Image: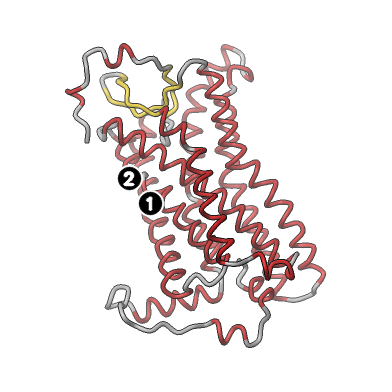
C-alpha cells in the first residue's frame, strides 16, 4: 500500500491529465448511498459464486478431464479469465464503501486486470462459439483443426490481444483527490473526448458487437444442421445454444447501451435534459455493470456443468473429496471410454452442449 505522504505537495495540481467521472469498475458519481450500501454486498456475492464455480471448472478440467481437446483448453481459459475478472472485486467493493486506500500502482494494476479479464472472457466465448461451429457444421475439417496444439496457440494469442486492448486502462488510471478522499479514476490525456469515445467504442465493439455477430452467425448455421436431424439429443443442444445466446445478450447489452449513452450524452441530450439524466446514467452504469458481472458466475453453468460428463465428475469429486480436500493421490475414473463406445466425436460434442 502506497504512502501518500511521500507525494509532492503540488502532485494533484501539476498533473497534466483531464479527469473523467468514470471509476473502474465502480462508476457511481451520483447516488452515493447506492455505491456505499448496495455495491459491496453485490460484488461480494459475484466474487464468492464466481470463485467457487470457476475454481471447480479449473479443477475438473485439469485433474479429471486432463485437457484432452480444444474445447477443454478454451473452457479452462474462459474460467481463468472469469477468475481474473472477479479477482479485483473485493478491492472495488471496499472502495465503493470507503475510499481508495490501495495506492496509485494498485489502481493501475487492478483496473488493467479487470479489463484483461473482461476482454479475454469475450474473446474465449467467441473461440468456444467457433469451436462448436467447426465441430458440428464442418465435422470433417474439425478433426484436423480442433487439436490441443491449435487450441493452445490461439489461447496464447487471445491473451496477448486482451492484454494489448487493456493497455490504456493500465496507463490512464491514476489516484486523485476529490472531496478530501482518494479516488481511483481514469485520467485521459489531451483530447479527452476523443480518447473517451474511442475507448468506449472499443469496449462495446470487442465486448458486445463482435461476439454478437460471430455468435449469431455460427449458431444460426449450427441450428440449421441440428434441425435437419430429428434427434432428441440434438434438440436439447438447440435449446442450450439458444440459452447461451440469450443469456449473453441479456446480461451484457444493458451495460454497453448505458455506457454508450453516457459517453455520447452531449450529442444525444439537450443541456437541461443532460443535467437531469447525468446522475441517473451514473447509477444506471453501476447497476448494469453488476448485472453484466453475473455472467462470470453463470459461465460455469452454461458452458460446463450442463455437460453430462461434468456433472458426473462433480459428483465423483464431492463423493470422494468431502473429508479430504482435493483427494491427493487418488485415481479418478475416466468416463471417456464408456462414452466413446456408443457415440461419435461430433455427437459427443453435441450431447454435452459444448
Of residues 153 and 325, the one nearer the viewer is 153
According to the image, label 2 marks what residue? 90
Apparent side of residue 294 relative to residue 128 in the rendered image (left or right): left
> Relative to residue 124, is residue 35 drawn left or right?
left
Contact between marks 2 and 1 (CB within 8 A): the answer is yes
Relative to 147, say whether 118 is above or below. above
SS class, disc 1 = helix
Tally of numbered discs:
2
Would you say residue 99 is visible in this rendering?
Answer: no
Front residue of this view, candidates 48 and 56: 56
Percent position (x, y) of residue 19? 41, 19
Q: Is residue 195 left or right of residue 141?
A: left
**Relative horizontal placement of residue 118, taking residue 201 as reference (left or right):** left
Checking the image for residue 316, the label placed there is: none
Point out residue 294 in the picture as x, y percentages from the top left corner: 48, 50
**Residue 239 location in percent, x, y?**
68, 64
Instruction: Pick whichever of labels 2 and 1 is earlier in the sequence.
Output: 1
Looking at the image, which residue sits at the far left? 5
* Residue that badge 1 annotates: 47
Question: Looking at the figure, which quarter contains the N terminus?
Answer: top left
| Identity of the residue drawn at 53% across and 23% down | 195
Where is residue 141 shown, x and y percent of the image? 73, 67
The quadrant of the picture occupied by the C terminus is: bottom right
Identify the residue shown where x is 66% and y is 82%.
343
Residue under the point 51% across and 48% down: 120
Q: CA distance from mark 2 to mark 1?
A: 7 Å
Q: Residues within 10 Å of mark 2 (few under 14, many from 20)?
A: some
- Residue under the image location 41 percent in, 17 percent down: 17
For residue 36, which quarter of the picture? top left
Amino acid at each position: 500500500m502506497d504512502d501518500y505522504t511521500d507525494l509532492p505537495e503540488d502532485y494533484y495540481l501539476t498533473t497534466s491529465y483531464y479527469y473523467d467521472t468514470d471509476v473502474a469498475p465502480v462508476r457511481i458519481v451520483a447516488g452515493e448511498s447506492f455505491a456505499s450500501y448496495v455495491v459491496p454486498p453485490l460484488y461480494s456475492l459475484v466474487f464468492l459464486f464466481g470463485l467457487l464455480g470457476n475454481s471447480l471448472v479449473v479443477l475438473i478440467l485439469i485433474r479429471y478431464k486432463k485437457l484432452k481437446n480444444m474445447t477443454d483448453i478454451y473452457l479452462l481459459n474462459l474460467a481463468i479469465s472469469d477468475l481474473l475478472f472477479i479477482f479485483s472485486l473485493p478491492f472495488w467493493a471496499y472502495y465503493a464503501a470507503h475510499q481508495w486506500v490501495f495506492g496509485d500502482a494498485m489502481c493501475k494494476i487492478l483496473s488493467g486486470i479487470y479489463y484483461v479479464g473482461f476482454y479475454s472472457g469475450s474473446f474465449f466465448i467467441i473461440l468456444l462459439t467457433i469451436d462448436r461451429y467447426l465441430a458440428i457444421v464442418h465435422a470433417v475439417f474439425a478433426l484436423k483443426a480442433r487439436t490441443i496444439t491449435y487450441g493452445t496457440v490461439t489461447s496464447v494469442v487471445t491473451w496477448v490481444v486482451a492484454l494489448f486492448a487493456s493497455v490504456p486502462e493500465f496507463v490512464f488510471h491514476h489516484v486523485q483527490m476529490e472531496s478530501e478522499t482518494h479516488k481511483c479514476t481514469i485520467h485521459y490525456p489531451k483530447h479527452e473526448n476523443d480518447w473517451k469515445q474511442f475507448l468506449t467504442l472499443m469496449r462495446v465493439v470487442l465486448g458486445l458487437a463482435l461476439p454478437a455477430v460471430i455468435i449469431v452467425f455460427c449458431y444460426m448455421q449450427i441450428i440449421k444442421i441440428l434441425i435437419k436431424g430429428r434427434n432428441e439429443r440434438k434438440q436439447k443442444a438447440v435449446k442450450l445454444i439458444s440459452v447461451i445466446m440469450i443469456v449473453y445478450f441479456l446480461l451484457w447489452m444493458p451495460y454497453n447501451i448505458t455506457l454508450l449513452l453516457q459517453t455520447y450524452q452531449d450529442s444525444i441530450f439537450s443541456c437541461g435534459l443532460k443535467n437531469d439524466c447525468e446522475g441517473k446514467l451514473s447509477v444506471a452504469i453501476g447497476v448494469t455493470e453488476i448485472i453484466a458481472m453475473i455472467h462470470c458466475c453463470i459461465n460455469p453453468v452454461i458452458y460446463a456443468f450442463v455437460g453430462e460428463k461434468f456433472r458426473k465428475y462433480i459428483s465423483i469429486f464431492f463423493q470422494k473429496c468431502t473429508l479430504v480436500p482435493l483427494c491427493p493421490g487418488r485415481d479418478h475414473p475416466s468416463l471417456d471410454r464408456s462414452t466413446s463406445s456408443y457415440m461419435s466425436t461430433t455427437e459427443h460434442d453435441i450431447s454435452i452442449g459444448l
